[in-house]
Structure formats: C-alpha cells, structure tokens
Image (cartoon, rainbow, N blue to C red):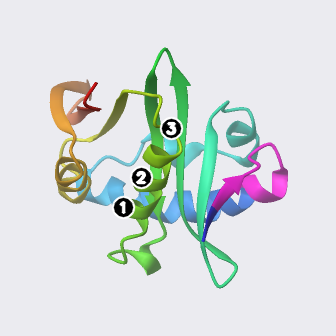
C-alpha cells in the first residue's frame, strides 16, 4: 500500500530515516563516496525539508519512500529509496508510477543520482528518463542528471 507520509511528524520522519540510512549506505558503497547528504539527515532536517513524501507499506511496515517538490510544471524528485531488505521487489517502480499518476498535470520530472550508481541509472533509463548531463561535485563524485517529459 502506498500512502502519504506526514513528514512534519517526528515519528514519521524517524520511520523514513530507518529506510533512508541503510538505502543510502548502499549507494555510498556503490559510488565509493560516504559523505552524501542523505546520510547526515536527521528527523529534524527531514521535517524541515519542504518535500512531499509517500511511503510504500507492506504488512504495516514502511519499506520504501519517494519524496519530491513541484515547481512550474516540474516535479523535482529528491529521494527514491527502498530498504535493502526489500530490493528487487518493484517497490521503487510502484512509488514512481504512483507519483506520476498523482501528478498528471506536471509535464516534466527531474532527478539526480550518483553517476556510478548503476542500479539507479538503469532504473531511471528503464522508466523513461534520459540523461541530461553529469557533473563532478567533490573529488571523484560524479552526479548524473535525468529528465522525463510527458507528451504534451
């Protein structure tokens, strides 16, 4: 089941952190960079993020999360994470699909991920995103940017 998460609730923010930290630790290992910002988030920073969050729940437990902001017809996807115990179950795809279905009036989605995070890069390409660029952020950390446009 997918439902909105009230991220301004400390309990719900703490629940999100229980998904976010292990998920982004996997990404940090894949890209060999351990200072990615989501790893230093706290309940307080999530509560103040201004992002809209949805969660995927299985038997009452949070297994995956998607968050975004909307501006001028664009959905800026900030987080798409699944707890490692639930990888390869289609949860990320379901969260992305729900986000798109709930926001049909927006005609563009953007997202960034570690360029060496091959599973994430493949996921976005498989789901209709095209790479729009890549930039070096710190040392060897390269971030790949993706975009998906709806037919207008």
What whole-number distance in Å separates the C-alpha atoms at marks 2 and 1?
Answer: 5 Å
- Picture layout, residue 7 above or below residue 106: below
What whole-number distance in Å separates the C-alpha atoms at marks 3 and 1?
Answer: 15 Å
User: Which image quarter holds the C terminus?
Assistant: top left
Is there CB contact under 8 Å for labels 2 and 3? no
Element carrying mark 1: helix
Q: Which span is picked out in magenta?
A: 3-13
* Residue pictured at 32% horizontal, 76% vertical: 88
Is there CB contact under 8 Å for labels 3 and 1? no
Element carrying mark 2: helix
Is there CB contact under 8 Å for labels 2 and 1? yes
Q: Is residue 63 left or right of residue 116?
A: right
**Residue 13: percent from left, percent from top:** 73, 52
* Residue pictured at 42% horizontal, 42% vertical: 35
**Residue under circle 2?**
96
Q: Is residue 140 left or right of residue 52?
A: left
Depth check, front residue: 103 or 75: 103
**Residue under circle 1?**
93
**Residue under circle 3?**
103
Is 11 magenta? The answer is: yes
Tell me where residue 15 sits by quadrant: bottom right
Depth check, front residue: 94 or 86: 94
């Amino acid at each position: 089941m997918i439902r909105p998460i009230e991220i301004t609730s400390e309990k719900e923010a703490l629940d999100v952190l229980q998904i976010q930290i292990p998920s982004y630790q996997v990404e940090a290992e894949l890209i060999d960079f351990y200072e990615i910002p989501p790893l230093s988030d706290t309940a307080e920073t999530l509560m103040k993020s201004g992002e809209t969050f949805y969660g995927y729940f299985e038997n009452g437990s949070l297994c995956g999360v998607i968050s975004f902001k909307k501006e001028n017809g664009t959905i800026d996807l900030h987080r798409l994470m699944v707890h490692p115990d639930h990888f390869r179950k289609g949860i990320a795809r379901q969260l992305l699909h729900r986000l798109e279905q709930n926001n049909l009036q927006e005609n563009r989605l953007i997202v960034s991920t570690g360029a060496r995070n091959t599973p994430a890069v493949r996921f976005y390409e498989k789901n209709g995103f095209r790479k729009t660029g890549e930039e070096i952020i710190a040392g060897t950390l390269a971030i790949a940017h993706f975009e998906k446009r709806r037919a207008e």
